[in-house]
Amino acid sequence: MHLKLHLPEVPMTRGEQWFLAIAWLVILAKCVFVNWAFQHWNVPLNANWIILPTLMFAAVASVLWVTHKE
């Protein structure tokens, strides 16, 4: 079975593009800080348990926000 998925293109304003870019920079900075903190204080947990869910939820939220219909 072959299903066609068509997502309409919703143009983003310049402000929305900047907001999304800044939000991703903050998310990436948080991930770098978490990795550094886990190594610096020898936390007995892998930092990926924090970083990977953060990136996955951020990606899902970004896709939903970019492809939303008004």
Image: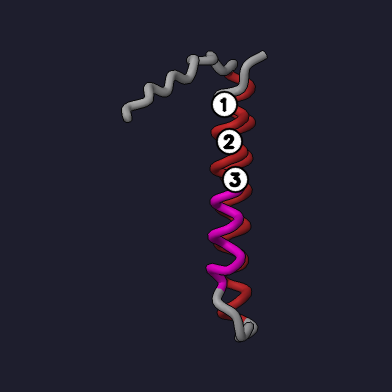
Residue at screen point 55% across, 76% down? 46
Residue 58, numbered label = 3
Q: Position of residue 30 (x, y in %)?
A: 62, 57
Label 3 environment density (alpha carbons within 10 Å; few <14, some 14–19, many ≥20): some
Task: Provide the residue designation for mark 1.
Answer: 66
Residue 37, numbered label = none
Residue at screen point 42% across, 23% down? 5
Q: Secondary structure at mark 3?
A: helix
> Cα distance, mark 2 to mark 3?
6 Å
Q: Quadrant of the N terminus?
A: top left
Q: Amino acid at mark 2?
A: Ser
Q: Quadrant of the C terminus?
A: top right
Q: Amino acid at mark 3?
A: Ala
Q: Position of residue 23 (x, y in %)?
A: 63, 40
Q: Secondary structure at mark 1?
A: helix
Q: Is residue 26 above or below residue 50?
A: above
Q: Is residue 11 magenta?
A: no
Q: Are marks 1 and 2 in contact (CB under 8 Å)?
A: yes
> Cα distance, mark 1 to mark 2?
6 Å
Q: Which residues are magenta?
A: 47-57
Q: Position of residue 66 (x, y in %)?
A: 57, 26
Residue at screen point 62% across, 16% down? 69
Q: How many marks?
A: 3
Label 1 environment density (alpha carbons within 10 Å; few <14, some 14–19, many ≥20): some
Task: Provide the residue designation for mark 2.
Answer: 62
* Residue extending furthest toward the front: 1
Mark 3 and mark 1 lie on one chain; the one further toward the N terminus is: 3
Q: Residue 33 falls in which quadrant of the image?
A: bottom right
Q: Are marks 2 and 3 in contact (CB under 8 Å)?
A: yes
